[in-house]
Image (cartoon, helix red, strand yellow):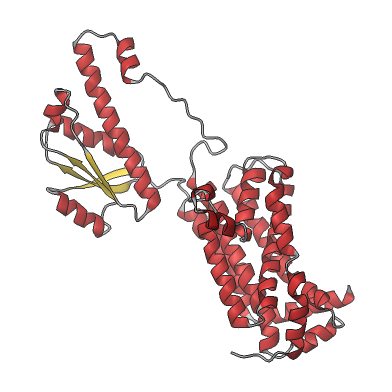
Amino acid sequence: MRSIINIALRECGFMSRNPMYLCCMVLFPILVTLLFTSMMNEGQPQKMPVGIVDLDGTSTTRAMIRRLETFQTTDVVAHYNSVSEARNAIQRNRIYAFLLIPRGMTEELMANKQPTVSFYVSETTLVSGALLMRDMKTLCMLVSASVGQKVMAARGFTDKAILAFLQPITIDMHALNNPVVNYNSYLSTMLIPGCMLLFILLITAYSLGTELKFGTSKEWLAMAGGHISKAMAGKLLPHTVIFVTMMLGNTLYQRYVLGFPMQGPVAYVLLLDIVTVLAAQGFAAFIFGLLPSLRIAMSICSLWGVLSFSLVGSALPLYAMDTPLQAAAQLFPLRHYFMTYQICIFNGYPLPYAWVNIGALLLMITLPLLTMPHMRKAMQEYKYMP
């Protein structure tokens, strides 16, 4: 135990002299937390710019446009004379979508001829495109129902009969645990830990690689009595304490300051943060032990950390991906963190419900055992090659 503490104090000395540790372990995680939570502080995108191409120009179409402007996520900023002008505005990022109202739409609508109204949406920004498409579809449904109500009322139908015809099924929808559909409380709880795991992977590989780079690897092993496991434990101990503190601080900030919906107890949060940090460190140490090169290990860790954002399953569900991608996603610590967080903290289920994901994280912690002999040999014999 004394040798582990001495190595940990030695590592603290390295960290105090190298500003990279301060930036990647403290400064950048704080900046990432403030950036993402403030970027989506409104919960959903508000008043996104939309254009209108109104070729009909009647009082009915003008009422449609006024109703579209009342939607929370839509802001009608421009009217265009043709589709080409509106398309050019989308390509220049001046608007995210435009609504094309054809000539003669009002006349066909009154005659029950089902006129065609077109939506043009930029899917370059997926969230804004989906929300604006929803608003324009809702608008057309409301206008159609309004016209149908007037026609049926003129023919003598009662209000009850009209309602039964226009809306035979009433949908009563309840969004569980996130009733206001707050994107901040859903995405920030994945993006921020994902960035922190990327920092953990890089710093772990960097700290191990610098022992070879600066020729201090033999001294490091000697302090541990030649035991690579003790040397690893002492070296990564300060990193673990700092990263767990940053992860826990981020979650508590989201829970008690920002009011994110979290059903699970704080003990679950602490346990998940500790296991996830150790899993990321174990994975990075495994990669370095497999390929004991500072440059190659950091490159693989950076690639692994970036790919995890795509395969975590928050934007696109994992079951919708191809089978090879579903299998590959299980190799990323962020995927198991996200699933455990959603099951046990966001929804409040007991830990056994996420035993597969917790078991995968625990397995990643033990990965360095496979490459420790190779790492020990590298620290004793290899020479650093830039």
**Picture quarter containing residue 213?**
bottom right
The furthest residue to the front: 323
Residue 16 appears in view: no
Q: Residue at x 20, y 53 (%)?
A: 87
Residue 80 appears in view: yes
49 or 136: which is nearer to us?
136
Percent position of residue 184, x then y:
50, 49
294 or 136: which is nearer to us?
294
Percent position of residue 33, x then y:
55, 59
259 or 24: which is nearer to us?
24
**Quadrant holding the N terminus:** bottom right
Vertical placement of 329 versus 198: above or below? above
Vertical placement of 138 versus 79: above or below? above
**Quadrant holding the C terminus:** bottom right
**Picture quarter containing residue 221?**
bottom right
Vertical placement of 191 versus 237: above or below? above
Q: Residue at x 13, y 49 (%)?
A: 82
Q: Residue at x 29, y 44 (%)?
A: 75
**Picture quarter containing residue 286?**
bottom right
Percent position of residue 140, x then y:
26, 33
Vertical placement of 1 versus 58: above or below? below
248 or 90: which is nearer to us?
90
Q: Quick check: 13 left or right of 97?
A: right
Percent position of residue 141, x then y:
29, 30
Tally of marks: 0
Q: Quick check: 151 left or right of 43?
A: left
